[in-house]
Image (tube, rainbow, N blue to C red):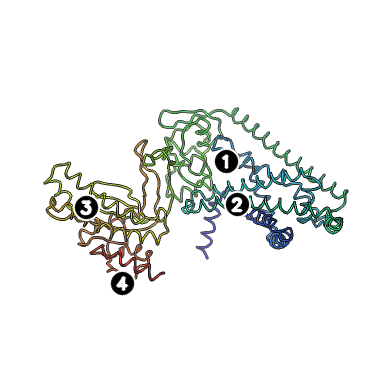
Amino acid sequence: MAALQTRLADLLHGTSARQIRLVCGVILFAYVVSHFLNHALGNISVEAMEAGVYYHTLFWQFLPVTIVFYGAALIHAGLGVFALYQRREFRWKTIEPLQLVLGLSIPLLVMAHLIGIRLGLTIYGHEKLYPQELYLFFVLAPARLWQMTILLVVAWVHGCIGIYFWLRMKPFFARAAPYLLAAAVLIPTLAMLGVYQGGRSVAADSDDADWRKTNYTRQQVGTVAENKVLDRISGGLVVGYLGLLGVVLLARGVRALRERRGGMIALSYGNGKTVRVPKGLSVLEASLRHNVPHASVCGGRARCSTCRIRIIGDHAILPEPSQREAFVLTRVGTNDPSIRLACQLRPTCDLSFFQLFMPQTLAANAQGSAPARIGQERYLVSLFVDMRGSTQLAEKRLPFDTVFIVNRFLAAVSQAVLENGGQPNQFVGDGMLALFGLTADPQTACRQALKAAAGIAVHVDELNQLLSHDLRQPIRFGIGIHGGEVIIGDIGYRDHIVFTALGDAVNVAARLQDMTKTLACEAVVSDEVRLTGGLAEEALPAQEVAIRGRDEPMVVRVVGDTRQLTSLVDGTERAAA
C-alpha cells in the first residue's frame, strides 16, 4: 500500500499542465473521431447516419462519460487560453503556433452548433438530428455549411498535430506513421463526403411536403422565438470568448512592459555569446528570440532533457526547479543542482552557462538528408564482434596488407549483419558493433542477431578459403550478444557525428565478447537474448559469470560453434508457426 502511495505521489509530482492538456485532448479527439465516423455513414444513407448517431449519443451522453467529456473540453480550452498568455516566444516551428491558433478558433466555430443542439435540447427539448441539421445546411442556410466544413477541418488538423507531438518520440512511431497518415487523410475525407451525400439526399427529399411535415416539426427544430433566444446566447458567448482573448493579449502586453521596466539580464553561453533579455523569459525562449541554436527535441515541453544546461558560478541564487523540471532531471539521473532545463529555468539575474547537448541540424552519417536524432529510448540487441590475432597478423605483414585483410573481415561481418536485418554501427580497429531492433520488435531482433552470428561464421569461412594462400592460420573471431533498453541518438561534434547506442546493454555485449577468449568459444549470448528470442532452455549450455561493473552474476549461454544458431532459430520459428 505504501509503495502504491509513493508511486502515485511520484506520478502526480511529475504531472504538468501540458500532460493534463494532452489527456483532455485525447478524450476530445476520441469524440471527434467517433463523430467523423458517424458522418461517414452518410455515404451509405441518411438512415445509416441516424442509426449510428443513436449509439454515438448513447455512449457520449452516458452521465459519467458526459461529465468527463465536458470537463475535458473546459480544461483543454482553459489551458489553451493560458498557453496563449504563458507563451513569451512564438518563434518556434510553424506547426506549433498553428496548432495554438487552430485550437483557440474552435470555440468560435463550434459555439452556435453546440448551443443550437445541446442547449436547445436541454431548455426546449429540441430533437435536432441529421435530417434537421442537413436540411438547415443544404436548404435553408447554405452559408452555415461552409462554417461547419471549416470547423471539421480545423478540429481535425488541431487534433492530428497534437497526436503527432505526443507520439513522435515514441519508439513505434516510425512504423506506425504511414498508417496514422492514411487514417488522418481518409477519416475526414469520408466524413465530409458522407455529409455531402446525406445533404443531397435530404435536399431531394425535402421537396416533399410530407417529409417536411414529419422531419421539420416544432418539437424537432423549435419556434422562431426559441431559436432567436439560442442565437442571442450563442452570440453573447462568442463576444465573451473574444473578450477573454482580448484580456489575455492585453495581459501579455502589460507583462512585457513590466518585465522591461523590471530590468534586463545578460545570458552568457560560455562560448563568448551573450544576449540581453527581459526578466521572466526562460533560457530556451531567450535562445530562440536571439536565434541562438539550442537543442530541444520536445519543443520546450519538459518532455525531454536535451535542452539541459550547466550553470557556471553560483547556482544557489536561481529559482527552485518546478515540479515538472525536478521530475525530468530525476528521471535522467541528474542530481547536480548546477544542471537545469533551459525550457523551465527563468533566471532573474545575470547568468553564465554552457549547453550539455550542442544542437546539430544534420548527422554526418546521414549524408545531409536526415535530421539529427537525440535521446530516444528503446529495446535493441547489441552484437559485438572482434577479430582474433590481428596483432600477430600485423607483425608479419606490410601495413597496407594488414588493413586490407581487416577490411575484408569487417566486410564479411557487415554482410552477415545486413543479410539478417541488422545495422553495422561502429567500427573500432578490427572490431564492430552491430545493432538489431531499429525496425523490428524485440523477439525478432534477438533472432536476427543470433542468425547474424551464424552468418558471420559462414562468411568468415569463405574469407579464409579465399585468403588461404596468404594466411598462416584461419581468421578467428569472438562475438558477444546482449539485449536491453538503450538510448540511441547522434553522438559527436560538428562534422564528426555518428548515430549509435549508449547504455548498459551495449557495455554488457562488449564484456561478453571479451569473455569468449577465456571460455574458448565463438560466442557468448546473454540469457536475456535466448529467452526473448524464444529458444528453449536446453538449446544452449548455461553458465553463470561475473560481469565487470555489475554486482550480481549473470547467466549466459556459451556457443562453441555459431553455425548451429541458424538451425536453432529456424526450429523455434517453425514450432511457433
> Which is nearer the N-term, disc 4 or disc 3?
3
- Viewer-proximal residue among 523 and 130: 130
What separation in Å lies between label 2 and label 1 (alpha carbons)?
Answer: 24 Å
Q: Read off the residue under disc 1.
A: 96
Q: What residue type is labelled 4?
A: Glu
Residue marked by disc 4: 538
Determine which residue is flagged by label 2.
Answer: 186
Mark 2 → mark 3, Cα distance in angstroms: 53 Å
Q: Look at discs 2 and 1 and give the one toward the viewer.
A: 2
Q: Is mark 1 on a helix, strand or loop?
A: helix
Local SS, label 4: loop
Query: Mark 1 packing: few (<14 Cα in 10 Å), some, or many (20+)?
Result: some
Amino acid type, mark 1: Glu
Quote the CA–CA distance across marks 3 and 1.
50 Å
Q: What SS does tag 2 mark? A: helix
Crowding at dot 3, Cα within 10 Å, few <14 / some 14-19 / many 20+, comes out as some
The first of marks 4 and 2 along the sequence is 2
- Identify the amino acid type marked 3: Met
Quarter containing the C terminus: bottom left
Whether the residues at callouts 2 and 3 have beta carbons within 8 Å, the answer is no
Percent position of residue 372, x then y: 43, 41
* Residue that numbered label 3 is attached to: 387
Disc 4 residue crowd, few under 14, some 14–19, many 20+, Cα 10 Å: few
Q: How many marks?
A: 4
Q: Which mark is first along the chain, 3 or 2?
A: 2
Where, by quadrant of the figure, is residue 214 drawn? bottom right
Which of the pair 159/493 is nearer the observer? Answer: 159
